[in-house]
Image: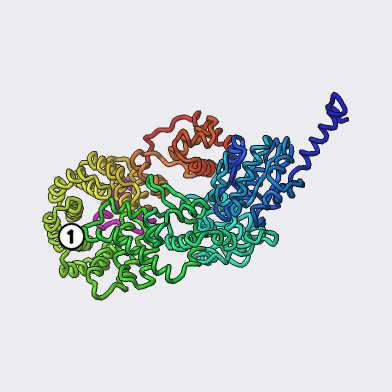
Amino acid sequence: MRPGRHYCANACRQLAYRRRKEVAGAGNIVPCPDMFIGRHEEIAAVGRLLGGSRLVTVTGPAGSGKTRLATEVARRRRGHAGGVWLIDLAAVSRGALVVLAIASTLGIRAESPVALAEALTGRKVLLVLDNCEHLLPECAAVAEELLARCGGLVMLATSREALRARGERVFPLGELTLPVGTVTRHQAARSDAVRLFVDRASAVDPGFRLTDANAGAVVALCERLDGMPLAIELAARRVRVLAPADLLSCLAERLDVLSVGGRTSASRHRSLNAAIGWDYDSLTAGEQALWRRLSVLAGPFPLDLAKVVSGLDDVVDALAGLEAKSLLTPVDVAGAVWFRQLESIRVFGRERLTAAELASAGDRLAEWMLARFGTHLLDFSVPPSVLREIGKHWHNLVVTVEWAASTGDPRHAPLACVLAAHWLDRGINAADTQDMLVTALRGAPADRPDYAALLVSALSTVTNVRGELDEARSHADRAVELERTLDRPARLARALDEQGHTRSCAGDHSGAKPCYLESLELLRALGDPVALLGSLNNLAWAALSWSEPALAAELLSEALPLAARLGSPSTVTSVVHTAGVLALFEGDTETAGSRFADSLAVDSENPHHVAYTVDGLGIVAVERGDDRRGLRLLACAAAIRERAHTPSEPFWQERVDAAVAAASTRLRPRDVAAARTAGRKVPLERAAEVALHGVAPPPAERRLSAQEHTIATLVAEGFTNDRIARRLRVSERTVTTHLERIREKLDVRSRAEVAAWVAREDQAPVRSTTTGA
């Protein structure tokens, strides 16, 4: 007898021996030979579900790692003296064989659920039923029978869709964590998706490392594969013959490059095509057709767009079927339920899309986009509400424009103008916008001068934003020439406004003024207050560039009340900014600073607007004698412009240069250099906060958003993810994603370390909020 163990009788000793032997030897789950990466929150969440329910089903699309997660959860479970058993049902072809598969795995003779239940009575067993999707009714029936008869039994299932058995709790498994935004190599290495890729790549190529040179391609590759573990593992096996950047290019339209799984892997896991094809073959003809036709969409889509693209009479049932099988992912878009396909699933469907289906789906999609947004191209400018709606659809608008370009469809021209309006409003993709519009202009039908006028007008705007003033003026002149032959007064007013702007930027003030005044006269006659506001502001801004502040003041006295009434964000921010510049001309720095702050509070995302407004606050700071803060803000604005490739207009740049020179002469060279360096480090998303509140930015990796700080505090208070989700009224998945970002930013791995960070923050002295930018 071992020291420290005492038994009241020999029978007790034998019973204890049998139990120890049962615990030590029962079950068939063994550790996998490769490292399990990530999924810490998911493991904990499934464990909590098993603590409150005896049947939990992990659902997810092909390659999401359901089996691996379930086995990791099962391997870590305690209290199952009867063993932890994995029953792989992938090769079970008939429902009648489910009981036999379970019985044979456990070494039990049983041919019915009742007989199996009798054999398991009194035993504390965890059964992992893997790959149930093709045997759902039978698995549900067996689970209900066993759980009703065996009080010590717990079941964990994996399936593409829920069993829908009584008492079942479902855990949808999503992607591995992906890097957020532009990240460094070290930040990328904290992402579970990137860590998995690097681990598996180094297993086949010991020399592979994540470097500054390949980090961007690795991150893009993991994003392209939606963070799906199987796809990432298969991609990683290719690094001996394809660099990450080359692999990314190969994946653009085909999945067969991912076809080198392990020799001992299940056949469907040796190729992503095979894994997804297993799902495709199990669908009805209607579900397959919907899958294929939805593959023309590159982003989230609502139900009505799914109906249009599919061309099917009854799409609701088929859509619900795909969602239930984890082949569509529900997403929240402005409070409405939309859907999206994972990229690997979309590419699979695209590979099976017939030429006739592609032509038909593309035609319906183009017609839907043009009917929804194209009519607004005839306005002086696309209304803000429409721009917001375009923003929801822009991914799908991009593929629509590409389809129209590839097929020579005449709708290419107006569709390109719609997309250009979105990109210009967001202040992004100026170079891509220009290339797209030039391509559309080359292919525009010769008998459609109305299309050509729209395109050259948009090209005038984008080339002006990029600082290509001669080209912008040429396009504007051509737009006016074309619009004078068409009966479109609002578009003629827009073309004249652009013509005046290009001439003003080139220093031709006498030539610009008549253009602006004719545009303003046309808009007054039309009675469109939004368009009128834009025209008033543009002429006021031009008047300031001509050093005519009296004219600017007269125009703004009409524009500011109109802006307050309309409340259109993009227009308001411009008008208020112009009023701030007028105050600078008048020497009223207090009013100027207030105007610039108001403007920045309305729009803190468009880099073109943000740069001009931060410039204004920087000039105000210099004129008030706060040279360090002024230089920081002016450097911040310059960096934003460089990253967005949008130089400022000449007259404004002269004002900025004068402020920089004045501040630099009053500071020591090292202080000038330090201020400029600090300003250039401020990212666009923090520019408004820094400019408005004067808070020096902490290191980006350690700064938590307000929501993240709240979640970290609740973690420190002992809240589970489920409780945090209920407290904040968000999904548990949202909490999980925020927690992953918190750990990345704080460079910690556990909840305890997050709690320790919160405790340190609470004890730290309060930082001043009056520090310079």
What is the crowding at mark 1: few (fewer than 14 residues within 10 Å), some, or many (at least 20)? many
The reply, left or right, for residue 105 in relation to residue 199 is: right
Q: Is residue 85 above or below residue 439?
A: above
Residue 529 in the image, given as x and y percentages of width and height = 17, 50
Mark 1 residue element: helix
What x and y, as percent, mark residue 402? 39, 66
Q: Residue furthest top?
A: 8
**Left or right for 553, reference 143:** left
**Three-letter amino acid code of the residue under disc 1:** Ala
Q: Which residues are magenta?
A: 641-665
Q: In this rendering, is residue 434 above or below 98?
A: below
Quadrant into which the C terminus falls: top left
* Residue that appears at 26% across and 58% down: 650
- Is residue 642 among the parts visible in the rendering? no
Q: How many marks?
A: 1
Q: Residue at x 33, y 44 (%)?
A: 630
Residue 47 position within the rendered picture, expressed as x and y whole percent measured from the top left? 61, 39
Quadrant occupied by the N terminus = top right
Badge 1 is on which residue? 490
650 part of magenta stretch: yes
Residue 377 sits inside the magenta stretch: no
Determine whether, in the image, residue 408 is placed left or right of residue 475: right
Q: Residue furthest bottom?
A: 446
Percent position (x, y) of residue 97?
A: 68, 53
